[in-house]
Image (tube, rainbow, N blue to C red):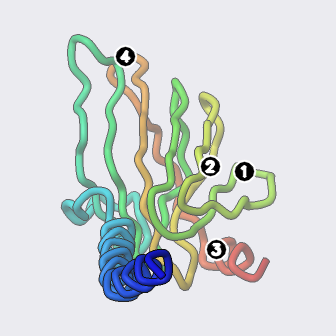
């Protein structure tokens, strides 16, 4: 009889606390989801230098200094925004932190890129990168210098080139 009473008490306690624990776990999971969907860095300032098509923004993370011969920035591309064709004399690394887009080297098919992808761009390779037509995209750009130069800007990506990539 003692065992049955003890079992009944355990059942009541478990029945009383299980919904609270489940609610607490659900609340924690929802908070984690909200935090995971937030941008990693703020949007920054709109780029108005003529080297981007559409709305793109830069949030500087680390400027070149005596210890680092590179610069780091977070670039946010609204849907349809992209860089001009360009090269980097010492290469570049992109780490996609949000959304989806494309990276394309001249003469090669465009590669879709998404959150979590890392793109290692060799020195002096003509390329462009940006958001997909229907998705914003953000990435961290790590760009090394050669002398005082870290990028050589070229012509804009044409609407025909960009449209062809988005039909893939």
Q: Residue furthest front?
A: 1
Q: CA distance from mark 4 to mark 3?
A: 32 Å
* Residue under the image location 51 percent in, 79 percent down: 135
- Element class at badge 4: loop
Say whether marks 2 and 1 touch (CB < 8 Å).
yes
Q: Is residue 82 above or below residue 104?
A: below
- Element class at badge 3: helix
- Element class at badge 2: strand
Q: In the visual, does 94 lie left or right of 150? A: right
* Dot placed on the residue nearer the N-terminal end, 2 or 1: 1
- Element class at badge 1: loop
Q: CA distance from mark 2 to mark 4?
A: 21 Å
Residue 64 in the image: x percent, y percent?
25, 25
Q: Residue at label 4?
A: 147
- The image quarter containing residue 39 is bottom left
Q: CA distance from mark 1 to mark 3?
A: 13 Å
Q: Is residue 113 above or below residue 66?
A: below
Q: Residue at label 2?
A: 127
Q: Residue furthest top?
A: 66
Q: Is residue 131 above or below residue 151?
A: below
Q: Residue at label 3?
A: 162
């Amino acid at each position: 009889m003692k065992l049955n009473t003890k079992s009944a008490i355990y059942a009541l306690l478990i029945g009383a606390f299980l919904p609270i624990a489940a609610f607490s776990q659900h609340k924690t999971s929802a908070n984690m989801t909200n935090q995971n969907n937030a941008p990693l860095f703020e949007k920054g300032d709109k780029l108005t230098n003529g080297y981007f098509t559409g709305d793109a923004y830069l949030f500087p993370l680390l400027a070149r200094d005596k210890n680092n011969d590179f610069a780091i920035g977070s670039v946010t591309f609204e849907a349809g925004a992209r860089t001009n064709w360009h090269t980097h004399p010492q290469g570049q690394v992109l780490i996609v932190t949000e959304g989806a887009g494309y990276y394309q080297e001249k003469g090669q098919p465009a590669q879709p890129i998404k959150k979590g992808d890392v793109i290692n761009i060799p020195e002096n390779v003509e390329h462009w990168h940006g958001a997909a037509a229907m998705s914003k995209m953000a990435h961290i750009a790590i760009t090394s210098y050669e002398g005082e130069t870290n990028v050589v800007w070229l012509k804009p990506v044409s609407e025909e080139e960009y449209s062809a990539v988005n039909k893939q």
